[in-house]
Amino acid sequence: MLRTVVYVLAAMAATGTALSLLTSYRWYIRMWDFPRVALILLAVIALILAIPILTGWARMLVVIAMALVIGWQGFRIYPYTTLAKPEVAKAVINKDNCLSAFSFNVLQTNRDYARTLKLIDRVDPDVVLLLETDEGWETALKPVIDRYPHRQSAPLGNLYGLIFLSRLPVEDAEITWLIDTETPSVFATISTRAGAKFRFIGLHPRPPAPGENTEKRDAEIAIAARHAKQTDLPVLAMGDFNDVAWSRTSQMFKRIGGYLDPRIGRGLYSTFPANLPGLRWPLDHLFMSPDFTLVDMKVLENVGSDHLPVSATVCMAPRVATILNDEPEAPDAADRKDMVMSIRDGKKAAVEEGTASGGSPPKP
């Protein structure tokens, strides 16, 4: 019986790791990008049990295979531990160029509105991005919404509604559908209190799921990366990307867009699933161009959603930040090819499904 347990755990860890190495849009392959911590845990348990329970070649093969799994998965998540060097510096240069931002997937079916309202009241962010908001959420959040002079809302009943709020000056804010007519994104030019301008991007593409491959998700992420590359302004990107920070797509997004990730060297900042603390992964992101420094970033408490909220305070300080921060990793030919192919394949998938939007980010 125990031998069977060891073999099953080892097979799961090895199979999940092997599938995560493949390049594919298939949901049953891309889903293995997510549970890297869980795969390490399975491999550790299988390795520990294999030593006293198995013998001979079986024990050797399981021990070697699980060591490889632990090594590979550990290598992928190592940058998101405190053992790595942070690439975004912590510094406050000019408080009038600092801002607080808050992103939260509220879970459309979560009707405990009061806890979210109380949390936003306490955090009191300058910029708010709320996801999975339908008309019920928009009505319930009216006391919060009314406090923000700049608002964009797309209440939807399909789990992809969004609300964007800002108390800072905003130009050309627009909710747009990048790939299909079901998943809106928000783009805006925001000014700090000192008048420095930056681009804000808020995303919530679809996740890999049975019957839902990742062509459209990857295309939305790629379009946002291309937009950041093309704008002359600093960029702050937030949202539930339905992708983990270490995936091939997110890493392409980071390099093409010239982004830095404040989580690197500081921790996973895992947000999903909220009710499984030891097995969460980082789905809710904050990426920034190297013009920003970090003051603080937190994953906040569970207020009824399957996601945890993310709050961050950052400062625009282009001259100092480019000295204190690491340089963004430059994209290579493979990244550029991935970007072009992702956008092409995502648009093709949307056309085939009859959901193509023909949208594009507004020009800053």
Image (cartoon, rainbow, N blue to C red):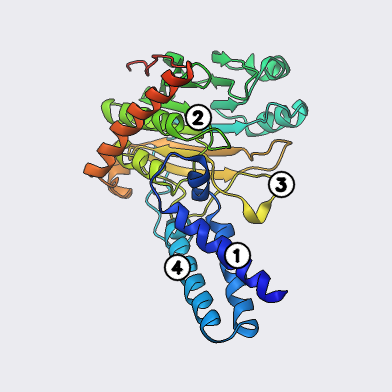
Instruction: Report which residue position mark 4 lands on.
Output: 71
Instruction: Report which residue position mark 1 lands on.
Output: 42
Label for residue 275? 3
Q: Secondary structure at mark 2?
A: loop
Verify CB contact (< 8 Å) between mark 3 and mark 4. no
Mark 3–mark 4 Cα distance, whole angstroms, equals 27 Å
Among the two numbered marks 4 and 2 on one chain, the one whose residue lies closer to the N terminus? 4
Mark 3–mark 1 Cα distance, whole angstroms, equals 19 Å
When asked about the image quadrant of residue 319, the answer is top left
Q: Secondary structure at mark 4?
A: helix
Which residue is painted at 26% across and 26% down in the image?
230
Verify CB contact (< 8 Å) between mark 1 and mark 4. no
Q: In the shown orientation, is residue 274 left or right of residue 357? A: right
Q: In the shown orientation, is residue 192 left or right of residue 308? A: left
Mark 1–mark 4 Cα distance, whole angstroms, equals 13 Å
Among the two numbered marks 1 and 2 on one chain, the one whose residue lies closer to the N terminus? 1
Instruction: Report which residue position mark 2 lands on.
Output: 205
Q: Vertically, is 174 above or below 282?
A: above
Mark 2–mark 3 Cα distance, whole angstroms, equals 22 Å
